[in-house]
Image: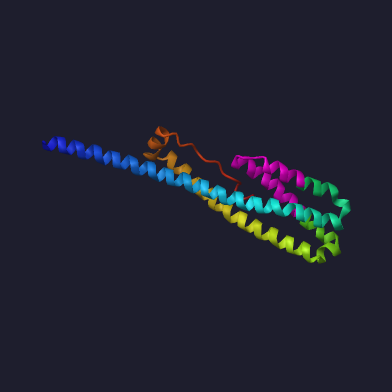
Amino acid sequence: MSSTTWWLLAGISALLFWLVALFNRLVALRHTVRAAWSDIEVQLKRRHDLIPKLVEAVRQYAAYEQATLDQVVSLRNLSAGRTRPAERGEAEHDLEQALHRVIALAEAYPDLKANQGFLDLQQEISTVEQDLQHARRYYNGAVRQYNTRIEQFPDLLVARLFHFTPAEYFQNEED
C-alpha cells in the first residue's frame, strides 16, 4: 500500500470518527433535553395532584370564591391537555397565577388560614413550585445547549443531515 493511499484512508477514517463523535454528542444532548422534560412532567403531575385537595380545602371555608376555584380546575385541565413545552408553559404560568390567588384567599378567611390541612397543602405546593422552578431552569439550560449545538458549525452539518430539530423552551426565566 502506498503512502498516499494510507494517508487517504487515515483522513477518511478521521473524518468518519469526527462525524460519529458529533452525532453522538447531539444524541446525548437530545436525550438530556428529554430527560429534563420528564422531570418537569413529574413536578407538574405533583402540582396537578395537589390542586383538587387545595380546591376542596378552600371550598369548605370560602364558598363565595367558587369562580376562583372553578378557574383553577379549568386551568389545570387545560394544561393537562397540552403536550408541547411552549404551550404547556403558557398554560402552567396561568395556572400558577391562579394558584397564588387561591392561596391568597386564606388571608380573608382566618379559619382557613389556621387549618393545619390547608397549611400542609400550602407547604407542599410551595415545595412543588420550587422543585418545578429548578426543573424548568435545568430543562431550559439543556434546550439552550442543544439548540446552540445544532446551529453551530460544524455540528449543524450533522444536525441537518440527521434531521435534528430545535427543542422548545418551557417557560421564560422571568415567568
Picture layout, residue 79 above or below residue 128: above
Look at the magenta stretch and give its main secondary structure: helix
Instruction: Where is residue 69? Give x, y as percent.
Output: 80, 49
Asked which quadrant contains residue 7, the reply is top left
Direction left: furthest residue? 2
Q: Specify whether residue 85 is painted magenta.
A: yes
- Position of residue 134 in the picture relative to residue 142 (left or right): right
Instruction: Where is residue 107? Give x, y as percent.
Output: 82, 61
Instruction: Where is residue 47? Give x, y as percent.
Output: 68, 53
| Colouring | rainbow
Tell me what residue is drawn at x 38 percent, y 41 percent.
23
Please indicate, yes or no, whether residue 173 appears anywhere in the rendered image.
no
Tell me what residue is drawn at x 66 percent, y 43 percent.
90
Direction right: furthest residue? 64
- Position of residue 53 in the picture relative to residue 140 (left or right): right
Q: Specify whether residue 169 is painted magenta.
A: no
Picture layout, residue 54 above or below residue 4: below
The span picked out in magenta is 73-101
